[in-house]
Every structure is written in structure tokens, then in C-alpha cells.
Amino acid sequence: MNISAIEIEIPKAEDVRVTEDTLSVDLSDGRAISVPLEWFARLAHATAEERNNWRLIGRGYGIHWENIDEDISVEGLLAGKPSGESQKSFKKWLNQYQSRLTSQSRGRYIRRR
């Protein structure tokens, strides 16, 4: 009995949209994939401005959000994999993120006076 490996070509991301509850990615093969935003806690906690500040990485095989240090692969999305970030790591990030937001809003208040 012969077993042959099947090569699957992963499409590239071409466009990304993030709403309050969904991450949608248009792919190079004509498909679009949408997943719940809650799969990616950092994106779920980000502001609309931060969610829209993304760039393609790895020649389109991944998406990166600089402000929240989030990377998502097309392959992971197609496989239906939510974020693999541990709760400990996420809580550490969230504490730092909330501190940064608090500092930024204090700075805006002080400048307005």
C-alpha cells in the first residue's frame, strides 16, 4: 500500500477587516474567512484604531498588529485555530496595555488644560 502526501497550497491574505465582533480576511484564492474576534483576546480588547493598524507579513501568509503585538497566520485561520496565547501571558499583556492607555489619557487631559 502506497501512501502519498498531498501538498496543500495555503492562500495569502490580501485584505483584512476587523469589526466589533469579527475578523475577516480576503484570500488570494477568492475565498474570504471570518472568525469571531473573541478568538484573539488582544484584538478584542484593542481600540478600533489599533484594530485597523495592521500589515501583511511573510509575503501575505500572516497579519501583524504593531500596537498590540498580535500576529495571526492564514494557515491558523483556515485550520480554525484561535489564539494559543496562555492566560498568564494575556493577563500580563492586558495589565501593560491598560497602564499604557491610562497614561495616554492622562497625558491628553494634562495637555488640554
Image (tube, rainbow, N blue to C red):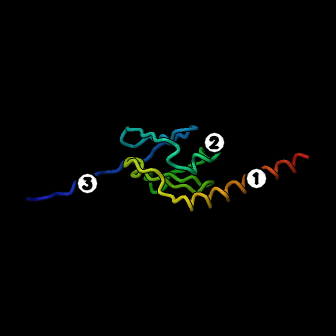
Residue projecting furthest to the left: 1
Q: What amino acid does circle 2 point to?
A: Ala
Front position among marks 1 and 2: 1
Earlier sequence position, callout 1 versus callout 2:
2
Left or right of residue 109, residue 28 in this image: left
Q: Position of residue 26 (x, y in %)?
A: 44, 40
Earlier sequence position, callout 1 versus callout 3:
3
Residue under the point 20% across and 57% down: 5
Q: Position of residue 87 (x, y in %)?
A: 54, 58
Residue under the point 77% across and 52% down: 104
Dot 2 corresponds to which residue?
48
Q: SS class of the residue under badge 1?
A: helix
Front position among marks 3 and 2: 2
Residue 32, quarter of picture: top left
Left or right of residue 103, residue 73 in this image: left
Dot 1 corresponds to which residue?
102
Answer above or below: position of 19 versus 50.
above
Q: Residues within 10 Å of mark 2 (few under 14, many from 20)?
A: few
Answer above or below: position of 85 versus 11.
below
